[in-house]
Amino acid sequence: MPLRPEMFEGHAVNRSAAERRAATLTTRRSVKKAHQAAWLVNAVRCMDLTTLAGDDTAARVRRLCAKARSPLAPHLIEGLGLSGRSITTGAVCVYPTLVEPAVRALEGSGIPVASVATGFPAGLMPLDLRLAEIRYAVEQGADEIDIVVTREHVLRHDWSALYDEVAAMREACGKAHLKAILATGDLRTLRNVYAASMVAMQAGADFIKTSTGKEGVNATLPVSLVMVRALRDYGDATGHRVGFKPAGGMKSAKDALAWQILMKEELGRDWLAPDLFRLGASSMLADIERQLEHHVTGRYAASSRHAMA
């Protein structure tokens, strides 16, 4: 849609109220026993299993893809009463040069391959090179592209420049889904977070995402609350639904529950499915497995009992 600044300019965000609301989310809703196990299995289904390390190799990506195909041990699947059901992660996320081995390893699984692009994580590259990186990842077989925006556009409130940048990236993605990383830890104010979310959606983002995982401050519940409210306002104004992906700093099963509660409370059950909600994480899966092991057997398993992600 065209850039419409009136949808966000002058929109105030009360930081203390946002922090209070975020702090009470997990205390207002108690999820225990079988219900907690179900929520944790759903978190696995919505997880972008990710490796974005400098020493990534094709072998590591193949191992990650094997874990994405079978994220939970067979005895857990049986103990949870899920035998015969296909439980996989929502996607596997890698660097562009490792998309091709990921696509080969996931062939026939239905699991999409996501690739970061556009000079991840800083994004401080000429626009033509960032667009070329998107096109390269798509040519390699990526189904989803996680782009990073130029933070300076947000800090200077140059909304036209931000809109044009994201729109060009949306065009370069072609049929691939675009997830716009706002790097909220660099944006300074919650008002900037709200405005950047709105501009990214107006420019065609299929998802808005909190962080690269490389900033000093990554996903937090108050920031996520503001982005989710932007999703709701955008949907009310346009009738179009956009997805949400928190990423960075989330390591525990407790975190997986907290962000799902946020989505349920603010947007409803539709946003608890992989087409509208993703968790950018990898180490979180290990703790989810430990909690499910306790639910099934009454004991916490040693990490050596579960395959590495």
Image (cartoon, grey):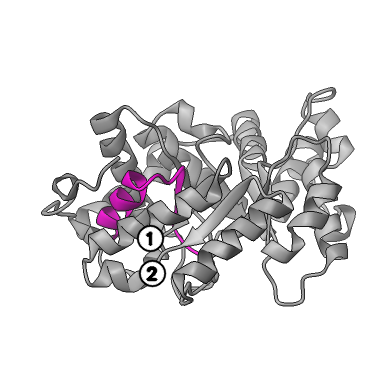
- Give the mark nearest the N terminus, 1 or 2: 2
Q: Residue 210, position in %: x, y?
A: 44, 58
Q: Residue 186, position in %: x, y?
A: 37, 72
Q: Residue at x 70, y 46 (%)?
A: 291
Q: Residue at x 46, y 49 (%)?
A: 170
CA distance separating discs 1 and 2 = 8 Å
Q: Residue at x 88, y 64 (%)?
A: 59
Which is nearer the eye, 89 or 167? 167
Residue kind at label 2, given as amino acid type? Thr
State if disc 2 and disc 1 touch (CB < 8 Å): yes
Q: Residue at x 81, y 44 (%)?
A: 106
Residue that numbered label 2 is attached to: 150
Residue that numbered label 1 is attached to: 165
Q: Residue 76, position in %: x, y?
A: 82, 37
> Would you place residue 250 above or below residue 264 in this image?
below
Which is nearer the eye, 144 or 222? 144
Q: Which quadrant of the rendered structure holds the C terminus?
A: bottom right
Q: Is residue 132 left or right of residue 1?
A: right
Q: Residue 190, position in %: x, y?
A: 26, 60
Question: Around disc 2, counting alpha carbons within 10 Å, would you say few (fewer than 14), some (14 to 19), or many (20 or more)?
Answer: many
Disc number lying in front (1 or 2) = 1
Which is nearer the eye, 238 or 60? 238
Q: Is residue 151 left or right of residue 300?
A: left
Q: Is 241 inside the magenta-drawn segment?
A: no
Occupied quadrant, residue 183 = bottom left
